[in-house]
Image (tube, coloured by chain):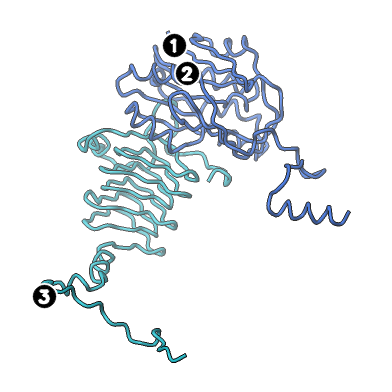
Chain colours: A cyan, B blue
Amino acid sequence: MWKRDDAVRPPTPPPAAPGGPAGDATAQRPPEPKRQLERDTTVNIGKSVVIKGELNGSEDLTIEGQVEGKIELRQNVLTIGPNGKIKAQVFAKAVIVLGEVMGNVSATERVDIRDNGSVDGDIAAPRVAIADGAHFRGSIDMQRGPAQAKPAEAKPEAKAAPAPGPGQAQPASPAPQPAGQR
Amino acid sequence: MAGDNTARTVSDLFRWGPRRGNPEGAGPPPEPGADEARVLPSKILPKFLAALAHQESPVLVDLGPVVGSNITFFGERLSCKIFVEDVCAEIERHACRDAAADLPAFLETRFSGRDATADGILCWDVFDYLERRAAQALASRLVRMVKPGGSVLGFFGTDDVERHHYTKYEIVDDSRLRHRPYPATGGHRHVLLNRDIIRMFEGLEVSEQVLLQIKVREILFRKA
């Protein structure tokens, strides 16, 4: 009956370990600033943004808008958001696709096409993951070793469609998919 | 009587009790095993894999719907280049537009690329969904696409039933496949006789052929 309500008490930090170094105060701090920093290093291109041309950078990038041309983030992660529409050649360390990509994708680490993501083009990466509801049309080259991303890069012109391979005739006009396939 | 109805409703809600057929007019009755994935052995898949394993960086063409785990399997296991050409999606697209008659011409032009470039072709059961002219058009194109020494794997149904699903074949291991049905506009299954299949793939030799208990003929073709 006379028990104090602990919920109204202001939170008190846990006592420091006896004999612990004074500098441990930083370790007890919540990791908010670090997380904030990580958040800050990812750049966003918003839904309404349309870019035509070449996009280079050294930060992780999330694209929710439209990009046509070429995207190069060789040391970073590129995320194509659910609203993102890319018609470009893509080079990155890792590429995560939740939206639509038309064009060849090269990654030195991995390409991940998530549920409802769509890629029409050739993929070159050591690791490729395609989710069940994803759409993909093109070829996949899972080479071993980082140096092997070069053949796709060597092409002088930006190409926004899968390269003709065995049985591929019209790379520039992939057939539309029925909605049920997504 | 009312109690029975209530029990049925509750049973339906929680999916208890035996599965009942669709009410009249609500579409065809479900096909046996059409709604669940099954893991079944494959006698020909190990031989197909073995044939590809002899090639240096083989080129593989998959005519079925994209299956992520298969891509990983082939990429890691054979380090091959895989071309995904979802023919089922094209069949579905034509079926939805009621344009199945255009399919033979479409299949002839769609694959008009370089000849003799594929080390292996996975047809799965695509031919079961094609009428004779379309099947012949696709088979002729595949025969040209495959390299000398290359292999073609195909499954051909032997029972004449209506089908309202396609199947994703997910490789579990070297000799087992998970059959995962998914909905299709559907229609009649086109059963091909053995001699018709051999004629259709003129230019290839039947290397192995197995009739499975599930009434599917697995065939491995090789190009000499």
In-front residue for pair A149/A11: A11
In-front residue for pair A179/B47: B47
Asked if disc 2 and disc 1 are in contact, CB closer than 8 Å, the reply is yes
Which residue matches tag 1? Answer: B223
Say which amino acid is labelled 2. Val
Which residue matches tag 2? Answer: B152
Residue A39, given in percent of the width and then of the height, sits at: 28, 65
Which residue matches tag 3? Answer: A22
Placement of B26 over or under A150, stated as above or below: below
Say which amino acid is labelled 1. Lys
Label 3: element kind: helix
In-front residue for pair B208/A45: B208
Placement of B17 over or under A26, stated as above or below: above
Cα separation between marks 3 and 1? 76 Å
> Which label lies toward us, 2 or 3?
3
Cα separation between marks 2 and 1? 9 Å
Q: Label 2 neighbourhood size at 10 Å, few (<14), some (14-19), many (20+)? A: many
In the rendered image, which quarter is residue A56 located in? bottom left
Q: Is residue B97 visible?
A: yes
Residue A181, given in percent of the width and then of the height, sits at: 55, 43
In this image, A38 relative to A134: left or right? Answer: left
Kindly indicate whether the residues beneath marks 2 and 3 are on one polypeptide chain. no
In the rendered image, which quarter is residue A36 located in? bottom left
In the rendered image, which quarter is residue B24 located in? top right
Subunit bearing disc 2: B
Q: Label 3 neighbourhood size at 10 Å, few (<14), some (14-19), many (20+)? A: few
Cα separation between marks 2 and 3? 70 Å
Subunit bearing disc 1: B
Q: Which residue occupies 48% across, 50% down?
A: A116
Say which amino acid is labelled 3. Ala
Q: Which residue occupies 53% across, 25% down?
A: B124
